[in-house]
Amino acid sequence: MSDQFFEDNELPLDDNEPFDDSLDENELPLDPGAAVPATRGQGRGPTAQVPPELVARYDQVVAEILDRTPEHMPEPSLHRVQRVMELMGDPQHAFPMVHLTGTNGKTSTARMVERLLRELGLRTGRFTSPHLHDMRERIALDGEPVSIESFLAAYDDVLPFIEMVDAESMAQDEPRRQVRMTYFEVVVALAYAAFADAPVDVAVVEVGLGGVWDATSVADGTVAVVTPISLDHTRLLGSTIQEIATEKAGIIKEGSIAIVGVQEGEAMEVLIARADGVGADLKAEGLSFGVLTREVAVGGQQLSVRGLASDYSDLFLPLFGAHQAHNAAMAVAAVEAFVGGGEQPLDRDVLRAGLAGVTSPGRLEIVRRSPTVLVDAGHNPAGIDALVEAIRESFTFTRLVGLLAVLREKDVEPMIRSLEPILDHVVVTRSTSPRAIPPRELGALVADYFGQDRVTVVDTLPEALDVASGLADEAGIGGAVLATGSVITAAEVRALLGLTTT
């Protein structure tokens, strides 16, 4: 995404200006595991001191969940997760929900929405995916991952119902319907049970993949947020923007308020049709809300945004890039929609405090100094484009060394092409994922764009990080490393540098 793209879609707006639907525009790995397991018993809050027997049981339960059918394997169906919810007494209806989908920006926007709602004094549940280090990251209460004890308690409560649904599924006559609940369906069931048990005042829920058939969609959001849609996961969601938008539009439910980020015209047409069809009130960025001004600031950026009910100035966001400013505008509009139907302004001091407290691990995150090492979970062309523009805008490195590891199913050449102008050298490697492109194969692709003299191929990520750091060190204080290409790459580099909490 270019600077011009964002400039063309910033406010101020003319109230009489017609909507232009021609505007141009968490990773969910298909394998369920995180890149690097967290060190159990360490970290913050209630998990700091956990008895070893509970840690062992937790690891066993996580292994059992991950051993289930991956989400992408069975045919699309909500039957299993709907059935387990029914047996549990429909806990997903015990709380109101803000539901988020889109291609990029879902997790960051979800974290912003949750942080603002918590700043307003509400008890929050947050469900995001994928996790970087620990499955408990997906299920957060009041901004913190659930404790090991709470996770195990929820699992013990839900397991009998899961086993009943598994038995019903395996008794089906048709072999294709003989599918146990998938790992993602189980984690969604755990999240909704934990949120109902807490209880939370509001849940902020990010889809795993798509919308119509996503397991999270057994709950209905009073507010639906759709971040920019682009091509990704095409094998599962469709090969065109229109097909992908049709899947994602499924989270817009009857009577809801839909907060829609800037979209390509064909995506916006689908979203408008869905909102009209279910009687939802669609609020589009660039028409009903948006970014008024923004300036680069130390540690992030200074914003003014137009919400649904008011304009808000002097907002500090400790995240980099125009894309995060637009995520913040969506978050502000979503919170206004939730707490006052979009008609009541938010308290400005609360809004400032909430945005200033936002974090988004793995999203252009500085994880080390001397040399500076940044990680970013960009894993598709649109995500890498946003990353490139954020680097150009927010940093002035004299030498930037890329550390690149990408998964097999990704559209890698446009990513490489976008990275070429900002990287002085690239160290090509692989993550531990079995789906990672082999380093020599990826290196050959990178060399086509960078030239052989700007590419180094290293077989393992730890060694590659050392090589990249050494190359950056040669430039002195102005040298830096940018590790990107997948969520798994970002997670593994974080862990290598001692960061396993989010």
Image (cartoon, helix red, strand yellow):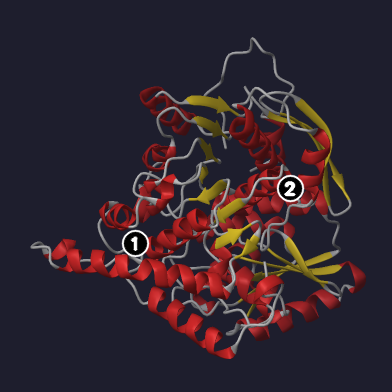
314 shown above or below 286: below
362 shown above or below 67: above
Q: Is residue 195 left or right of residue 390?
A: left
Residue 455 visible somewhere in the drawing: no
Q: Earlier in the sequence, mark 1 or mark 2?
A: 1
Which residue is located at x 62 percent, y 26 percent? 342
461 shown above or below 166: below
Q: Residues within 10 Å of mark 2 (few under 14, many from 20)?
A: many
Q: Position of residue 185 (x, y in %)?
A: 37, 61
Residue 72 bears which disc, if any? 1
Q: Nearer the viewer, residue 17 or 341?
A: 341
Q: Is residue 297 left or right of residue 203?
A: right
Q: Nearer the viewer, residue 103 or 161?
A: 161
Which residue is located at x 40 percent, y 63 percent? 184
Q: Amino acid at mark 1?
A: His
Residue projecting furthest to the right: 477
Residue 321 bears which disc, if any? 2
Q: Which type of secondary structure does the marked residue at label 1 adopt?
A: loop
State yes or no: discs 1 and 2 in contact (Cβ < 8 Å). Answer: no
Which residue is located at x 44 percent, y 63 percent? 190
Which residue is located at x 77 percent, y 78 percent? 469
Q: Quadrant of residue 164?
A: bottom left
Residue 115 visible somewhere in the drawing: yes
